[in-house]
Image (cartoon, rainbow, N blue to C red):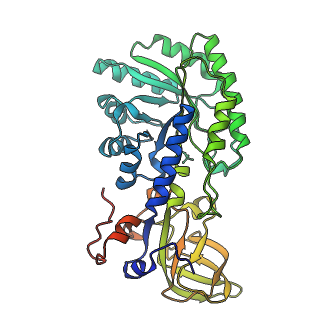
Amino acid sequence: MKTRFPLDQFQKLETPFYYYDVDLLNKTLDEVSSLARQYGFRVHYALKANSNVPILRRISSRGYGADCVSGYEVRRALETGFNPSDIVFAGVGKADWEIEFGLDNGISCFNSESIQELEVINEIAGRKGVKAPIALRINPHVDARTHHYITTGIEENKFGINPWDWDKVIKCIGRSANLDWQGLHFHIGSQITDIDVFKGLCSRINEIQAWFACNMFTPKIINVGGGLGIDYSKPDGDGTDFKTYFEIFSQHLDLQYGQEVHFEPGRALVAQSGSLISKVLYIKEGVKTRFAILDAGMTELIRPALYQAFHLIENLTSDRKELLYDVVGPICESSDCFGKAVNLPETRRGDLIAIRSAGAYGETMSSNYNLREKVKTWYSDEIISNEQSTHTPSGKQVG
Ligand SMILES: *Cc1c(COP(=O)(O)O)cnc(C)c1O
């Protein structure tokens, strides 16, 4: 039986719900910001991993910047205390209103991925009489060796500007009076656990920035993106090795005098702090398989259904003998399965189940499929300090 969760409190709450360990979140945020300061790196948190207001406030108050991929995220970042001059805006398809919104709010950089988009940004900025700060998102053709749905830096990907277009791009910037070129941006994928991949990225960046420098484009900013993976099998473990990660970039990037290095971690900052807590509705015996049917499903956490992602699953309320279960949700899709052949203590209706490491790409990817409603969110500090009833949840997510 697991004791890290406030089980007495959990028993009183309506399930399913998301639960965040605020101490762990704070510890991770403090560790990363202090390491980044040591190396002189700048960190922009990628909002799409988790954009809950209380979490974003914790991140912005520690001096992080924000990496946004939609106008809505830019708006959320502004609302939660991020400085406009610390907000960058990436994405392969920015709509005109999103570009206008970014310019009107004076964000620090548009990470742009195509000549056509550069032309549109230039035109809109011209109309507004401002200069648009831009960086070029480069496709470095580095394989992140992760799931193909979350690989973004190889040739056949929709992301980034390919080498055969670099000539045209610098000509485009040269003739665009309203673009203010800041530097180069790279983001090769997500949940990267092979740390050597980042060494490969560094040597590609060195080559690429040399090419740009030869063409009179010396970047002020090198933005290496995010993608650092976590160990989903160890949600209670020592955590992610941020020191080695930063060390690699410090050792392997050839930097020019005065250049800034920017990072955009999302998952690694927030994933381990979140769990999806669910109740067992039914146990169903198949021919060869025993199913534990939960009240949470792919509508709350789609990662297993979408990319066969692994999450550690724990029964919080049983210490009976272990059996094998397929742990599934109630949604009318066969892919609505959190884990196959999972070892759990004998599980019964009413048991509480924790799906761990769900703090990143959990709530932000949730949906209303089957007309399900968004679940509540609880934070450890509130749950422990309040003996509130389940009907007036002060920990309910704002916005
Ligand atoms: C998603 C994304 C990130 C964050 O990725 P993680 O794997 O969560 O660290 C960073 N930068 C860009 C441009 C992204 O799209």
The answer to whether residue 379 shows anywhere in this view is no
**Percent from the top left, x then y, of residue 6?**
44, 75
Of residues 80 and 362, which is closer to you in this image? 80
In the rendered image of this protein, does residue 378 appear above or below residue 268? below
User: Residue drawn at (28%, 67%), measured in percent from left and top?
Assistant: 394
At 41% from the left and 43% from the top, the residue drawn is: 62
Relative horizontal placement of residue 215, taking residue 362 as reference (left or right): right
The front one of 260 and 351 is: 260
Question: Residue 150 in the image: x percent, y percent?
Answer: 61, 48
Determine whether 316 is above or below 321 in the image: above
Number of labelled discs?
A: 0
Residue depicted at x 39% and y 36%? 95
Q: Position of residue 23 (x, y in %)?
A: 46, 60
Q: Nearer the viewer, residue 214 or 8?
A: 8
Residue 277 appearing in the image: yes
Q: Is residue 241 left or right of residue 103?
A: right
Image point (61%, 68%), residue name: 312
